[in-house]
Amino acid sequence: MTVWGALGIGVSLGLGAGVTPGPLLGLVISETLRNGWRAGVSVALAPLVGDVFVIACCLLLLAQLPPVVFTLLSLGGGFYVLFLGWETLQTVPATAGLTTDSTRNTLQSLRKGLVVNLLNPHPYLFWLTVGGPFVIQSATQSAFGAILAFLSGFYGCLVGSKVLLALLVHSGRARLHSRGYRLTLQISGILLVILGGMLVWEGIRGLR
């Protein structure tokens, strides 16, 4: 896997995870509307902190598994990403009203984001079936540049898209049902479907 290929995979997955409605995205919107943009941005940054625990647990578990399991995980991860792509394409964006400002402590919003992130099953599923196997296989090939590119692309888009959304909601210039947001959902959904198909194909080839 080249560095650019790993970056492309990370960007596709991060964008899909970042803009698809879920518990964390809903909290970004609600905290922004209630407490201002700083609260929304604090929630958006939660994966950078909370996923350290998630990734460590998943990698420790995966390190104990035999190589053949990674082929099966590639299949499972591919179908999971296909499902995420289908779910993204079927999403009807919710409506958000104009923002109100507040001086409530943003650390409280960050704590809420961490709790939601740690209790959400999606990060664990992702790192067990997609992210974890990719990192371990790249590490065995000493492709540390690819790992860095993947993580940078993934978290850059995952966190960046949520930060941007918080700023847009706060400014009152955009709504979640806007044409631009619909287009972003469609593009990310298509990317996820393509990537999921590639992972499934890799898994099928590994079983031969």
Image: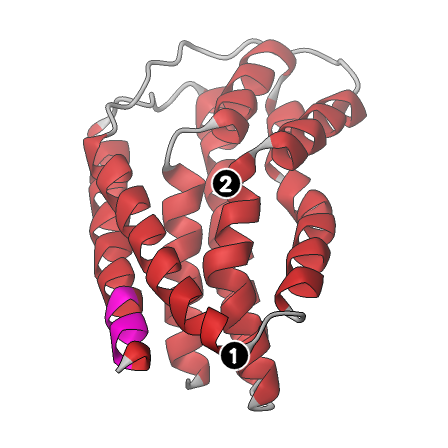
Residue on which the image places disc 2 = 122
Residue on which the image places disc 1 = 67
Find residue 201 and report its image quarter: bottom left
Please state which of the two labelled residues, at mark 1 or mark 2, is closer to the viewer.
1
Q: Does residue 204 belong to the magenta stretch?
A: yes
Residue 48 is tagged as none
In percent of width and height, residue 153 lies at 48, 63
**Other residues around mark 2 within 10 Å, as few (<14) / some (14–19) / many (≥20):** few
Residue at disc 1, secondary structure: helix
Mark closer to the chain start, 1 or 2: 1
- Horizontally, is 89 left or right of 150 in the view? left
Q: Are the residues tagged 1 and 2 within 8 Å (C-beta)?
A: no
Instruction: Answer whether residue 156 is visible to the viewer in this image.
Output: no
Residue 24 vs residue 179, the one in the foreground: 24
> In the rendered image of this protein, does residue 173 appear above or below residue 89?
above
Mark 1–mark 2 distance (CA, rounded to whole Å): 24 Å
In percent of width and height, residue 166 lies at 51, 29
Looking at the rendered structure, the number of numbered marks drawn on it comes to 2
> In the rendered image of this protein, does residue 7 appear above or below residue 57?
below
- Horizontally, is 98 left or right of 132 in the view? left
Amino acid type of the residue that numbered disc 2 sits on in the rendered structure: His
Q: Residue at x 26, y 80 (%)?
A: 205
Find residue 38 and report its image quarter: top right
Instruction: Answer whether residue 67 is visible to the viewer in this image.
Output: yes
Q: Main secondary structure of the magenta part?
A: helix
> In the rendered image of this protein, does residue 26 appear above or below residue 162?
above
Q: Residue at x 39, y 50 (%)?
A: 15
Q: Which residues are magenta?
A: 200-205
